[in-house]
Structure formats: C-alpha cells, structure tokens
C-alpha cells in the first residue's frame, strides 16, 4: 500500500474523476447529519479536490476529497471505489483556512 498526500505529492492537484454515483455507509450518514453536510446521489471530483490517495498494487483503494461547502467551510469525504461509483465511509468539515499544521507527514508514503 502506498499513501500519497497533496503536501508531499502536488501532482494530485491534477487528478479528477467524472461524475459517478455515490452511496454512503451508516457511519457517513450519521456524520453528515451531525456536521450539517448535504449528501448527493453522485459526485464529480474536480482537479484540486483530491488531498490524499491510497494505492494498492496499481489501483486506487481510497481517496480523500475536499470540496467547498460554503464560503468558509469545506466538506471532506473518504471514498472507496465501488464498481462504477464510490462508497463514502466518512465525512466531516474543516474551516477553509485550516492549514493542517498538525498533519503528520511521517505516515504518508514518500
């Protein structure tokens, strides 16, 4: 397994995915309600949305996306491939100015 992060692998900024259906785990639905996040039936992942990518073999096994929710708040979702779509396993919010000063880069693959 290899884990890439936008901080150590800026080329992730160019990654995008066409609109695909998305399903949510029970946990993700509960988190969305608690955080006030609206859930959609599909997701388009634009260049610049992917902040972390986990690869097993030569395939993406998990991605973390960050998308604007309001002017001040971003929605972060952890997605795993699911056939032609995605399964969201969790969701949370971050303030747009969150600079991840506490991010532990040691757990990210070089």
Image: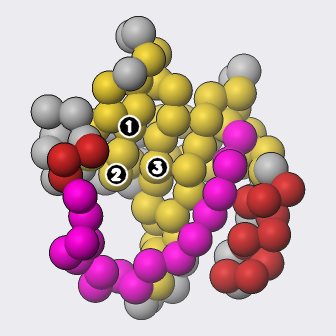
Q: How is the image coloured?
A: secondary structure
Name which residue lies at 67% across and 37% down: 86
Q: CA distance from mark 1 to mark 2?
A: 7 Å
Left or right relative to 42: residue 54: left
Counting from the top left corner in percent of width and height, residue 77 is at 56, 57
In 3D space, how far apart are the residues under numbered discs 3 and 1 (Cα atoms)? 6 Å
Near mark 1 (Cα within 10 A), the count class, few <14, some 14-19 or many ≥20, is: many
Q: Is residue 8 left or right of residue 57?
A: left
Q: Which portion, as a residue range, is magenta? A: 87-104
Asked whether, in this view, residue 43 is left or right of residue 106, the answer is right
- Residue 37 numbered mark, or none: none
Of residues 6 and 19, the one drawn nearer to the viewer in this rendering:
6
Left or right: 69, with 108 as reference point: right
101 part of magenta stretch: yes
Q: Which residue is mark 1?
A: 53
Q: How far separated are the C-alphas under marks 3 and 2?
A: 6 Å
Number of the label disc, if any, that sits on residue 51: 2
* Residue 57 image position (x, y, % from top left): 41, 9
Question: Of residues 85 and 30, which is closer to you in this image?
Answer: 30
28 w.r.t. 13: above or below: below
Q: Secondary structure at mark 2?
A: strand
How busy is the neighbourhood of tag 3: few (under 14 within 10 Å), some, or many (20 plus)? some
Task: State the SS at label 3.
Answer: strand
Q: Position of residue 50 (x, y in %)?
A: 38, 48
Q: Which residue is denoted by mark 3 in the rendering?
A: 64
Rendered position, 44 above or below 20:
below
First of labels 3, 2 by sequence position:
2
Q: Quadrant of the C terminus?
A: top left
Q: Using the rendered view, name the quadrant where residue 39 is placed.
A: bottom right
Residue 91 can be seen in this image:
yes
Magenta span has 41? Answer: no
């Amino acid at each position: 397994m290899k884990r890439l992060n936008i901080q150590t692998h800026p080329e992730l900024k160019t990654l995008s995915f066409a609109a695909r259906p998305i399903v949510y785990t029970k946990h993700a639905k509960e988190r969305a309600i608690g955080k006030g996040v609206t859930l959609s039936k599909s997701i388009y992942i634009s260049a610049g949305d992917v902040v972390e990518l986990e690869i097993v073999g030569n395939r993406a096994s998990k991605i973390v996306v960050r998308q604007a929710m309001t002017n001040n708040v971003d929605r972060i979702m952890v997605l795993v491939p699911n056939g032609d779509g995605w399964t969201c396993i969790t969701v949370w919010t971050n303030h747009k100015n969150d600079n991840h000063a506490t991010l532990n880069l040691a757990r990210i693959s070089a």
